[in-house]
Image (spheres, grey):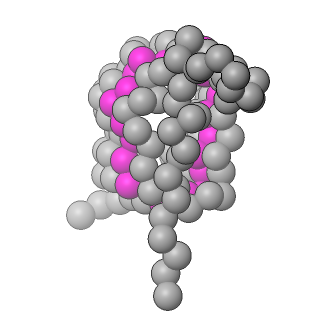
Amino acid sequence: MKNAGQDVPNEVYQSLDTAGEGDKWWEAVDLQKLILAHNSIEALKEDLRNLPLLTVLNVSHNQLSELPAAIGELHLLKSLDVSFNSIHKIPDEIGSATSLVKFDCSSNQLKELPSSLGRCLDLFDFKVMRIMME
């Protein structure tokens, strides 16, 4: 029997501005690093845009088949690890994450990479094992 996929709790996508009074501090912090590796996560929401201070996002070893376009709105993102998922396509919006220094998209099911990655001029640690051929 296959385990049901996990969702990222909605509270993770809330910024400090949207947290209500009386919330626990860890539910009301502007996240800079989000490590969600090894959690059987099947999807990230477009609400990722609510985390504008994010510099590190690690969603490796999950069950993602795609990344949200909102990934391009994370202008401070320096490290993105989406390795060991089932991602078929990286969204073109990734080119707007121009602070990206490290990007690991190895061990996925990619058929191509967006040319917009060329706008990430500081990207020097880029890992992609292979592109799947049809």
Residue at 65% across / 58% down in the picture? 38
Residue at 42% across / 50% down in the picture? 43
**From the viewer's perspective, is residue 117 above or below residue 68?**
above
Residue at 62% across / 58% down in the picture? 39
x, y (%) of residue 127? Answer: 57, 42
**From the viewer's perspective, is residue 102 above or below residue 30?**
below
Q: Residue furthest right?
A: 25
Q: Residue furthest bottom?
A: 1
First to last magenta residue range? 53-74
Quadrant where the C terminus is found in the figure: bottom left
Q: Residue furthest front?
A: 22
In this rendering, position of residue 16 left or right of residue 132: right
Q: Considering depth in this image, is 107 or 24 the residue closer to the camera?
A: 24
Please, what is the dominant secondary structure of the magenta stretch?
Answer: loop
Q: Any magenta on residue 112?
A: no
- Marks counted in the figure total 0
x, y (%) of residue 65? Answer: 38, 54
In this view of the protein, can residue 106 be seen by the observer? no
In this view of the protein, can residue 49 be seen by the observer? yes
**From the viewer's perspective, is residue 46 above or below residue 38?**
above
x, y (%) of residue 58? Answer: 63, 40
Q: Quadrant of residue 82?
A: top right
Q: Considering depth in this image, is 67 or 118 the residue closer to the camera?
A: 67
**From the viewer's perspective, is residue 22 above or below residue 39?**
above
Residue at 45% across / 56% down in the picture? 42
Q: Quadrant of residue 89?
A: top left
Q: Considering depth in this image, is 125 or 72 the residue closer to the camera?
A: 72
Q: Any magenta on residue 62?
A: yes
